[in-house]
Amino acid sequence: MSLMGFLDRVADNASFDKVIEPARRAVLGAFKPPVKDLLHGTWLGHALHPVVVQVPVGSWVSAGLLDAIPPLRPAATVLIGTGVAAAVPAALTGAADWSEQGSGVRRLGALHAVANTVALGLYVGSLAARKKGRGGLGRVLSYAGLGIATGSAAVGGHMSYAQSSGVSHAATAIRRLTTDWIDLGPMDDLPEGRPALRTGAGNGDDVPLVAVRRGARVDVFVDACSHLSGPLHEGAVEEIRGSQCLVCPWHGSAFDLDNGQPRRGPAANPQEKLDVRMEAGHVMARVPGRHR
Ligand code: FES
């Protein structure tokens, strides 16, 4: 069986959920806004986990190279300690994201977390061995940790690249839209201050859009939430932290109506917003230049 086939079997295996679900509920209960949004990277407009994991991964890979050169081994020990310390925020950001993903990604995420915990334990053991002067054992433990951390990184990559964890689902949807101006009908047909479903011509099929009218202003977004494609037209308009936001009905992500930036997670990516103009009382929308 190929590595990808093995990972797909893990993602399909619902029997893991007996263990995973209590852990997920514990994480959901432990992380509340604003800490939760801090960990997701909502404030940054980008997922935080892939940013912070650079520190432990980079430190441990570098330590592996320095350990191969005897005079540089003391520096390797410093880097291993740096990686151990940095593994804590990496784990916290990953746990926050993991708790609000789909079931298949959660199963792979559990495997990713277990492997990372084993790698971390090996590195802590390596530090302890080095401190006692047992450098040979320390290097064996740290190289074993590096091997497991590398395999775990492959699992994390599979979650993102093969299972779309952490990517913007709205960006995928907007690329299917025509690049021409789309007539969304008369502005007067839109309800005031509530999301309304509209559609735009796509490559082969129509793409759902969501329009929100506020007086003479209309904001139009891709309907599929950037987090996991929740239907934003079934959500609501609310004021979040001083901004009028479109709130997703699935996990509560809130996107600023003015610019699509997330004001509340779990979404870390902005919601794709279309350019809008009025023509003879009709709302006309078009994908922004970066997608044309
Ligand atoms: S789909 Fe999760 S917040 Fe929208």
Image (cartoon, rainbow, N blue to C red):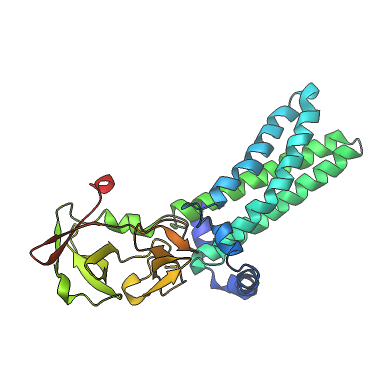
Q: How many marks?
A: 0
How far from the left and from the top, in percent, is residue 155? Answer: 55, 52
Q: Is residue 285 visible?
A: yes
How far from the left and from the top, in percent, is residue 103? Answer: 51, 69
Residue 143 location, quadrant: top right
Q: Could you say which is closer to the camera, residue 184 or residue 280?
A: 280
Kindly give the residue lying farthest to the right in the view shown: 132
How far from the left and from the top, in percent, is residue 188? Answer: 16, 74
How far from the left and from the top, in percent, is residue 26? Answer: 65, 72
Q: Could you say which is closer to the camera, residue 29 or residue 195?
A: 195
Q: Quadrant of ligand 1?
A: bottom left
Could you tell me which residue is drawn at 73 percent across and 47 percent down?
A: 85
Q: Is residue 2 visible?
A: no
Q: Could you say which is closer to the camera, residue 198 or residue 280?
A: 280
Residue 117 location, quadrant: bottom right
Left or right of 210? Residue 165 is: right
Q: Is residue 241 above or below residue 179?
A: below
Could you tell me which residue is drawn at 67 percent across and 58 percent down?
A: 114
Could you tell me which residue is drawn at 45 percent across and 65 percent down?
A: 242
Left or right of 48? Residue 130 is: right
Left or right of 159? Residue 198 is: left
Could you tell me which residue is drawn at 71 percent across and 33 percent down?
A: 63
Left or right of 189? Residue 120 is: right
